[in-house]
Image (spheres, coloured by chain):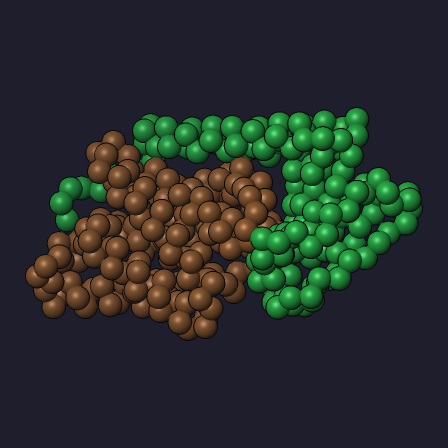
Chain colours: A brown, B green
């Protein structure tokens, strides 16, 4: 962390850009028409967090996450969205750091845990913003959905790791 | 990379699924029992920015009739109230999630409009119906 190589810095920058592009892309997927709940998302940017966690370690994964949240809120011109993405992202990050320390869990388990934590963080942000506990009523549905979205991001991450296994990217 | 990443779904992942599923079920159950225990008669509570704007006893509305309540904030939303159900009829917020949520008719349910910081929540019991058929967790 203290001494970041040019290679690591570049990889962090590329991954931040990728995460931003993915969060923008998922806004174009009208998942909320299928499940009409505020805050239902595929969590595509989580793929980047999972990748960064394994390839670069927790410190740089956290840097990428914070940069993504700040830049995302700036581009959207929405400070309110910052609270949602930061609380969701940081909760997911924390849970995934802890889960990835277990040698037993695969990327699937780690990203499903992350997706569930992300939804809990977002509901907490909604409770803070709205000033009532009412959004907690969405938590059971959101947790079920996080199993599906978490499995999806886990699947994409596993494809990604397989695809780059012949390169030395993972030793950055 | 420090250790090899496990790329295939394994038995231990089921533990993560189980923990999430059980938490969802427990939270759902807790919310339902809490909602069912609170008083009698269905009441619609309209809250914006954490302040209760209006609280309407739905049984006071005659069957077959409806009332409208307009909320002015960052966006304008029209809440439609009927004898046993309530919805956000229209809203000029950008994503329209609140309108798509549709009618709610059981205690503990709510319609949320995040951009408008608006919550329409139903409290009290829904008559003879215990609401168990809405267990989603």
Q: Position of residue A99 (x, y in %)?
A: 28, 38
Residue drawn at x 35%, y 66% as measured from the top left? A70
Q: Which image quadrant: the C terminus of chain A?
A: bottom left
* Residue A151 seen in the figure: no
Residue A78 showing in the rendered view: yes
Please state the horizontal and vertical placement of residue A60, each as a whole percent of the image: 21, 57
- Quadrant (top left/top right/bottom left/bottom right) for the N terminus of chain A: bottom left
Q: State the image quarter where residue B63 is shown.
A: top right
Q: Is residue B119 above or below residue A77?
A: above
Q: Is residue A58 left or right of residue B27?
A: left
Left or right, A167 with reference to A95:
left
Relative depth, front residue between B49 and A1: B49
| Residue drawn at (51%, 28%) of the image | B26
Q: Quadrant of residue B77?
A: bottom right
**Residue A78 in the image, given as x and y percentages of width and height:** 47, 68
Viewer-proximal residue, B98 or B7? B98
Q: Is residue B107 left or right of residue A88?
A: right
x and y, in percent, of residue A75 in the image: 41, 73
Q: Residue at x 44, y 56 (%)?
A: A84
Q: How many marks?
A: 0
Please indicate whether residue A124 sits to the left or right of residue B95 in the image.
left
Using the image as rendered, state which of residue B87 and residue B47 is in the foreground: B47
Q: Quick check: A5 above or below B135?
A: below
Q: Is residue A18 above or below residue A99?
A: below
Identify the residue shown where x is 42% and y is 42%: A116
């Amino acid at each position: 962390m203290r001494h970041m190589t040019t290679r690591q810095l570049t990889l962090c920058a590329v991954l931040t850009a990728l995460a931003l592009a993915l969060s923008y892309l998922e806004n174009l997927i009208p998942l909320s028409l299928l499940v009409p709940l505020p805050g239902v998302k595929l969590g595509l940017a989580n793929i980047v967090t999972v990748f960064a966690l394994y390839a670069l370690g927790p410190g740089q994964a956290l840097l990428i996450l914070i940069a993504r949240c700040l830049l995302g809120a700036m581009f959207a011109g929405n400070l309110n969205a910052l609270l949602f993405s930061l609380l969701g992202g940081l909760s997911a990050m924390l849970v995934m750091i802890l889960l990835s320390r277990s040698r037993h869990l695969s990327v699937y388990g780690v990203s499903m845990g992350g997706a569930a934590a992300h939804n809990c963080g977002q509901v907490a942000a909604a409770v803070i913003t709205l000033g009532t506990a009412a959004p907690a009523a969405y938590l059971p549905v959101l947790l079920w959905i996080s199993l599906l979205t978490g499995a999806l991001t886990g699947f994409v991450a596993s494809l990604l790791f397989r695809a780059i296994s012949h390169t030395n990217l993972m030793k950055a | 990379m420090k250790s090899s990443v496990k790329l295939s779904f394994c038995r231990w992942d089921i533990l993560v699924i189980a923990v999430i599923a059980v938490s969802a079920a427990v939270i759902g159950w807790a919310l339902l029992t809490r909602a069912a225990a609170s008083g009698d008669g269905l009441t619609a509570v309209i809250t914006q920015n954490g302040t209760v704007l209006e609280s309407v006893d739905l049984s006071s509305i005659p069957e077959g009739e409806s009332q409208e309540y307009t909320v002015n904030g960052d966006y304008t939303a029209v809440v439609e109230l009927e004898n046993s159900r309530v919805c956000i009829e229209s809203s000029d917020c950008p994503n329209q999630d609140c309108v798509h949520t549709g009618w709610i008719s059981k205690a503990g349910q709510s319609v949320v409009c995040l951009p408008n910081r608006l919550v329409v929540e139903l409290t009290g019991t829904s008559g003879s119906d215990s609401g168990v058929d809405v267990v989603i967790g």
